[in-house]
Image: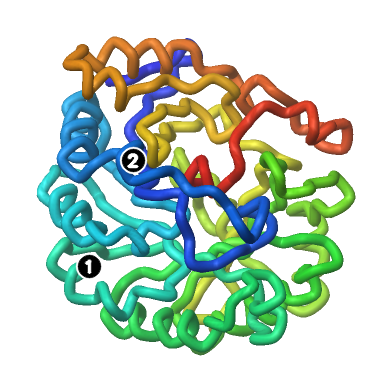
Amino acid sequence: MLVDGFNRVHNYLRISLTDNCNLRCFYCMPEEDYEFTPHSRLMQPSEIELLAKIFVENGVNKIRLTGGEPLVRKDAADIILRLSKLPVSLTMTTNATRLHDFADVLEEAKIKSLNISLDTLDADKFQIITRRDSFQKVIDNIHLMISKNIHVKVNVVIMKGLNDHEINDFIEWTKDLAVHVRFIEFMPFEGNRWTSNQVFTMDDMLQQIGKKYNPIRLKDDINDTAKKFAIEGHQGTFAIISTMSAPFCSTCNRMRLTADGKMKNCLFSQKETDLLSALRNGEDVLPLIQESIASKAKELGGQFTKDFEKIQAEDLQNRSMISIGG
C-alpha cells in the first residue's frame, strides 16, 4: 500500500495522456497558441502500462485517464485497451467531442463511467468559453453514452459572473435525463487569471439552488471529493466539489501522472517526481513513488489554506491545469 505521513491510503491514480486539447477553455489553457509537449517526451503506451502495473501492484484499484483531451492522442485506443486488462476500475475524463469515434473501444474496455467537462448549456457561450463550435457534438455524445448505459458525470466549473446563473438550468437538465452534474469551484492554476472574487462557493450554490429546489443530501463515499445531492423526481443527481471553500484533503487517496511522466502527489503540489526518466534509465521506480507519497503535504499542496480570499495566485508554483491533467 502507498500510505502518506497522515495515514492516507492512496489507491487512485490519474494518468494524463497528453497536454494537447481540441478545445481552448481559457481557465484551463493559458493561450490559444499553446506549446504542447513533443511526442518523444510523452509517456509511450508500453511505458504507461509498465508504470500503471507498478502502482497496481502497490494497491491502486482505480485509474482515470485525463488530458488535455485524452482522445486526441492517436494511440489512445491502444492505451485504453492495455490498461483495461489490469485489475482496476478504469474510467476517463473527456470533453466528449470525440466519444462517438471511441464507443466500441469503451465497450471493449468495459468502461462503465465517464466524467465529461461542460461549463454551459448555451451554445453561444460554449463557443466563447472553448473558442470552438462543438456544443451540439458534446450534447449528442452525452446522450450516446447514456444510451449505452455508461454512468455520465458532467463537470461544470462555476465562475461568478460567467455561468453561475446556469446552475439551476443544469439541475433542471437532470430531471428527465440520467446525467449526474458536478459543480466545481474555480481553482487557481498557472495562466488562468484566477482571482478570489470569481469563486462561487458551495454555500453560494446551495443558496441559489434552494430558491427553486429542495435538495436531498445523499451519502458520500469515504474518498469522495464531491458532496452529493438529489432532487425528488429527477433521474439524475448533482454534486458540489468545494476545493476552495471546504477542502476534502483529509480523505485524499489520489495521485497524478502528468503526460511527460512526472508524479504529483497533489493537484496543487509544487514538487514533482520524474518517474519517466527513471524508467527509461532502468532505475527502480517504486522507491520514488513511495518517497513522493511520504512527502505529501497535509492539505492543498502546502501552498495555501481554505481561506482562499487571501491567496495571491501569482505566488503559487504549479503548472497550468492542462499540463497537470486535472
- Please tell me which residue is depicted at 43% across the width and 59% down the height of the picture: 69
Q: CA distance from mark 2 to mark 1?
A: 23 Å
Residue, disc 1? 106
Label 2 Cα crowd, 10 Å radius (few <14 / some 14-19 / many 20+): some
Residue 229 visible from this viewpoint:
no
Quarter residue 254 falls in: top left
Across and down, in percent, residue 287 comes to 29, 10
User: Which mark is first along the chain, 1 or 2?
Assistant: 2
**Amino acid at the residue labelled 2:** Leu
Q: Is residue 264 above or below residue 42?
A: above
- Please tell me which residue is depicted at 74% across the width and 26% down the height of the picture: 304
Residue, disc 2? 42
In the picture, measured across the screen, residue 195 lies left or right of residue 286, that is: right
Out of 117 and 50, give the one closest to the viewer.
Answer: 50
Q: Is residue 238 above or below residue 234?
A: above
SS assignment at label 1? helix
Quarter residue 233 falls in: bottom right
The nearer-to-camera label among 2 and 1 is: 2
SS assignment at label 2? loop
Q: Is residue 261 above or below residue 239?
A: above
- Please tell me which residue is depicted at 65% across the width and 79% down the height of the picture: 127
In the picture, measured across the screen, residue 111 lies left or right of residue 32, that is: left
Out of 64 and 250, give the one closest to the viewer.
Answer: 64
